[in-house]
Amino acid sequence: MSQQQQSNDVSIDAIPVDVANSQSTRVEPEDVPEEIRSITQALASEQPPTNPLVALKAARWWYIHGKGGTDPVFQWAIEWTRHLATDRPSDVDQFDSFLDYLVTVGFADAKQALR
């Protein structure tokens, strides 16, 4: 038996994609699904995820609901995935921009609180 989806709420996996809210200029913390919030916070932590598919799941959500290819969370998740795949050092400046953005969005009051 299949489940019908409304045209404004589609999903590729368990994380819904809100088409009406895509490519937003401002992401509100309460709009971020718990799983994506958890992955995003893990990407900012001392022990980020080591499974590239997990990082790409967050990248996809932030690409769709954030600023697209220029979204700092999307860019960091892609950079972290590249690091995992190639074992090359990651871009420290990009990581700092990612942390600054999380503070701007409201995930924390200061960058230090994310680490």
Image: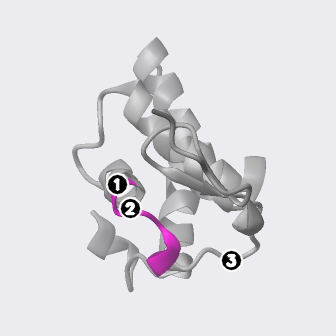
Secondary structure under the numbered disc 3 in the rendered image? loop
Classify mark 2: residues with Cα within 10 Å, few (<14), some (14-19) or many (20+): some
Find residue 115 and report its horizontal and vertical position in percent.
Answer: 27, 63
For disc 3, the marked residue is 26
Q: Earlier in the sequence, mark 2 or mark 3?
A: 3
- CB atoms of marks 1 and 2 within 8 Å: yes
What residue would you read off at disc 1? Answer: 35
Q: Residue at x 55, y 35 (%)?
A: 79
Q: Which mark is residue 4?
A: none
Badge 1: few (under 14), some or many (20 or more) residues near its Cα, within 10 Å? few
Q: Nearer the viewer, residue 4 or 106?
A: 4
The magenta segment: 29-35
Determine the CA span between mark 2 and mark 3: 15 Å
Between marks 1 and 3 in the image, the one whose residue lies nearer the viewer? 1
**Dot 3, how many residues are within 10 Å of its Cα: few (below 14), some (14-19), or many (20+)?**
few
Q: Which residue is mark 2?
A: 37
